[in-house]
Image (cartoon, rainbow, N blue to C red):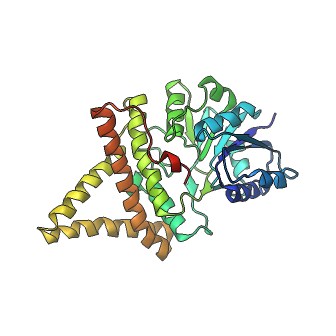
Amino acid sequence: MPLFSFIIPVFNRPREIDELLESFSHQKLKDFEIIIVEDGSTLSSQSIVDDWAEELPIRYILQENTGPGPARNTGAAEAIGQWLVFLDSDCLLPPGYTEKIASSVKDADFDCFGGPDRPHSDFNAIQKAIGHAMSSVVTTGGIRGGKEKADKFYPRSFNLGVRNEVFQAIKGFTNMRFGEDLDFSMRLLEAGYKTALLSDAWIWHKRRNNFRSFFKQVFNSGIARINLEERHPGTTKIVHILPSFFVVGFSLTLLLSAFFPFLLFFILVPLLLFFFDALFSLKQLKPAFLAVPAAFIQLLGYGLGFLSAFVKRRLFKRKEYTAFEKNFYE
C-alpha cells in the first residue's frame, strides 16, 4: 500500500499531463501511485501515460465525460494509497513536494490538507498575471492564496490531500460542475473532520492562459458561491460579496462620470492599486501591467456571476446551474 495515491482528471490536455508527469519523475520520495482519469477527451493522453509507465507507477482510466468531481471519484475508487492527493492537470510539482507532504502527514492530527500555488518563472506573463489576480489579498482577500484568516480553511482540488477512509466516509465529490472542491471541504468539516493548510507544500499552477477562459472560470465561481450557500447555509462571508459591491460601484461610477468627469479618478485608484500590488509581488513589469485587466476580470466576472445567481436562485427559485457548460474546461 503506497502512502499516496495521486489522482488527476484530464480533458484534452495531453501536453499538460506530460509536463506534470515529468515533475513527478524529479521527486526523491516515490512512495506513491498516479492515477490519470481521462474524462471523455477527444485529445487522448494515453500515449503520454504509456511513455512514462516504465519510470512511474501510473495507471490510466478512460471514461465518458462526467466533469471533474465524478472523474476524481473514479480515480479514488481505484486508489489504494493511505492518502488521496488530488491535482489539476495544469499543475507542476516542485522538487521535494512529496517529501514535504509525507513529513506533514506523519502522525498528523488532521484528516485533509491543502497547499497554496505559485507561478513558475517559465510561465508566460498572462499566466502570472491571472495567478496573481486569483491569489492576491486585493482581489480575493488571500483566501485562494494560502491564507486562513478570512474563514475556515477549505482545501481546493488543485492541491488537496485527504485520508482514503475519510474520502470514502463522506462519499467523495458530488456532481457539482463548479465549486465541487469547496463543497467537498465543507461537507468534510460538517462531518467533524479536520483540515490543515500546509503552507510549504505549494505547487506551480498555470491557471488559465487567456482572459476569455479566465472570465468564464470566475463567472462560474460567482455562481458557485450562491450554489454553495444553498447547500451549506452560512458559508458565504463578506469577502465573497465584495466583488459584487465592486461591480455595482464601478458601474455607477462609470455611468455618473458622463455627467461628473472627476469621478473617473475613482476608477484610476483601483487600477493603480492592482498594478503596484502585482509589481510588488511579481517584481516584473509586463505581468504587473497585465495584472490590471486580470484583476478587473476577476472582480467583475465573479461579481456578475454572484449577482446573476443571487437573482435567479433566490428571487426566481431556479435550480442549481452553471454557465458555459459546453466550454467548461476551456
Q: Position of residue 34 (x, y in %)?
A: 76, 44
Q: Is residue 214 above or below residue 312?
A: below
At 61% from the left and 51% from the top, the residue drawn is 200
Q: Residue furthest bottom?
A: 285
Q: Based on the displayed image, in which of its 4 quarters is residue 107 positioned?
A: top right
Q: Position of residue 322 (x, y in %)?
A: 45, 41
Q: Based on the displayed image, in which of its 4 quarters is residue 71 positioned?
A: top right
Q: Position of residue 100 (x, y in %)?
A: 69, 48
- 95 vs 286, nearest the viewer: 286
- Could you tell me which quadrant the C terminus lies in? bottom right
Q: Position of residue 262 (x, y in %)?
A: 15, 71
**Residue 276 relative to residue 45: left or right:** left
**Residue 291 relative to residue 67: left or right:** left
Q: Is residue 274 above or below residue 196?
A: below
Q: Is residue 215 above or below residue 111?
A: below
Q: Is residue 258 above or below residue 160?
A: below
**Residue 38 relative to residue 171: left or right:** right
- Number of marks in the rendered image: 0
At 35% from the left and 32% from the top, the residue drawn is 318
Whether residue 235 is visible, yes or no, is no
At 77% from the left and 50% from the top, the residue drawn is 46
- Could you tell me which quadrant the N terminus lies in? top right
Q: Based on the displayed image, in which of its 4 quarters is residue 321 positioned?
A: top left
Q: Residue furthest left?
A: 259
Whether residue 315 is visible, yes or no, is yes
